[in-house]
Image (tube, rainbow, N blue to C red):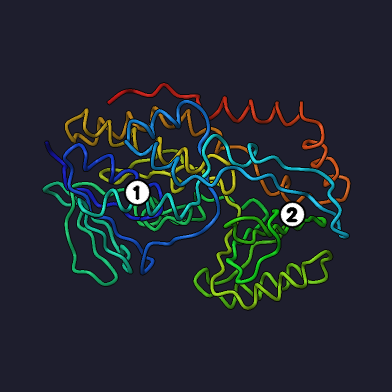
Amino acid sequence: MKNANILISGASIAGPALAHCLVRRGFTVTIVEKAPALRLGGQAVDFKGETHRTVLARMGILDDVRKRQTGGTDQEIVDANGRTLAIMPGEFTGGDLEIRRGDLSQLLYERTAPACEYVFGDSITSLTETASGGVHVTFERSAPRTFDLVVGADGIHSNVRRLAFGPESDYVRFLGHYYALVELDEGFGAVPRMYNEPGRLAAVGGPKAPAFFVFASDPLDYDRYDVRQQKDILARAYAGMGWQIPRVMDAVRRAGNVYLDSLSQVRIDRYHKGRVVLLGDSAYGNTLGGFGSGLAVVGAYVLAGELAAAGGDHHVAFAEYERQLRGYAKIAKNGNAGPFLAPATPARIRMRNWIFKYRFLLGLMMKMGDKFATDIEIKNY
């Protein structure tokens, strides 16, 4: 089989999922990850419908995901006095299977580490296709190497997409909101609660869940690896907010880690260029859109399956992967979770809460989500 030596950038979900599918089909895989180690913790991610379950089963990890699932937890929406206004049911946010992002990442890492080469604390600095076939890759720390194919599975702010396709500004659309996840050292009750004021949401409490924030904002210029900067941004964004927010922000200042990023959407007219292909959020990301992990895993299964079916012929495999995923990923082309999670006015907050008071509205939303999640014919590779 040709083109069997593959480099993947990104060790979150999409990259290890692809590695898992590739090594089972005889490919040699190296994964490079900018972070110094596997990132554990993080928010819950979910899988919906028969398509997601089928792919997880064919990958041989469905039972492991079930063993580590958190189980959807109902969340109370409260007012400034702590009175319950509505209940966001666990099945709305948790899908059929809910698992913490870090737990899923660790599961995939454990399945792939014995058969793959992981390089943490490093990043790609250049990609050059060679005349003899292959991609010459240079790194921040490691020595240069040549691979047959390169996969960008490194998120909305993809380094591979920037190097191979062009600057982020050409492909990523800011949606007017930011979100943050903070692992707090102190608890805020056994029941998860969320509180809104116009343009702002804060959610705390419950089992294993990090504090979660969404707020409207103009574009911000900050270092995504500077924790202090991100804490300062949150402090300014949530200044003067009621309920328990002053106490929550005190806990944020003492927290060890903060993850702050924009709500953004990737819009790109092709997923592959030469010997480089994009997977997951780097190709079809829509932050907090509710389908990111499912799209990443299904995309990984399809991409690996097509490469194997084509005998490593990337021209054939990349084109077929894109044909299948382009339609399936259309859910990521539309929608913006920001106005739903952090409505701009008191009236819009009330309207959002009505969805959870009147179950038929919620049922319609969930049926639509299930339809999108199963809108692909999955080949049995």
Residue beneath the point at 84% across and 47% down: 85
Under tag 1, what secondary structure?
A: helix
Q: As rendered, which of 31 and 204 lies closer to the eye?
A: 204
Question: Is residue 303 shown left or right of residue 1?
Answer: right
Label tally? 2
Which x, y percent locates residue 146? 16, 56
Which residue corresponds to mark 2? Answer: 194
Q: Residues within 10 Å of mark 1 (few under 14, many from 20)?
A: many
Under tag 2, what secondary structure?
A: strand
Q: Is residue 206 above or below residue 315?
A: below
Per the model, the C-alpha gap separating discs 2 and 1 is 31 Å
Which x, y percent locates residue 332? 55, 38
Q: Residues within 10 Å of mark 2 (few under 14, many from 20)?
A: many
Which x, y percent locates residue 156? 48, 52
Q: Amino acid at mark 2?
A: Met
Label number found at residue 108:
1
Label number found at residue 299:
none
Contact between marks 2 and 1 (CB within 8 A): the answer is no
Residue beneath the point at 43% across and 42% down: 65
Residue beneath the point at 81% across and 43% down: 86
**Image quarter of the N terminus:** top left
Q: Amino acid at mark 1?
A: Leu
Q: As rendered, which of 354 and 96 lies closer to the eye?
A: 96
The quarter of the displayed image where residue 158 is located: bottom left
For marks 2 and 1, the one nearer the N-term is 1
Question: Is residue 25 shown left or right of residue 18?
Answer: left
Which x, y percent locates residue 348? 83, 45
Q: Is residue 282 above or below residue 126?
A: above
**Image quarter of the C terminus:** top left
Residue beneath the point at 70% across and 64% down: 188
Q: Is residue 331 above or below residue 227?
A: above
Question: Is residue 56 shown left or right of residue 147?
Answer: right
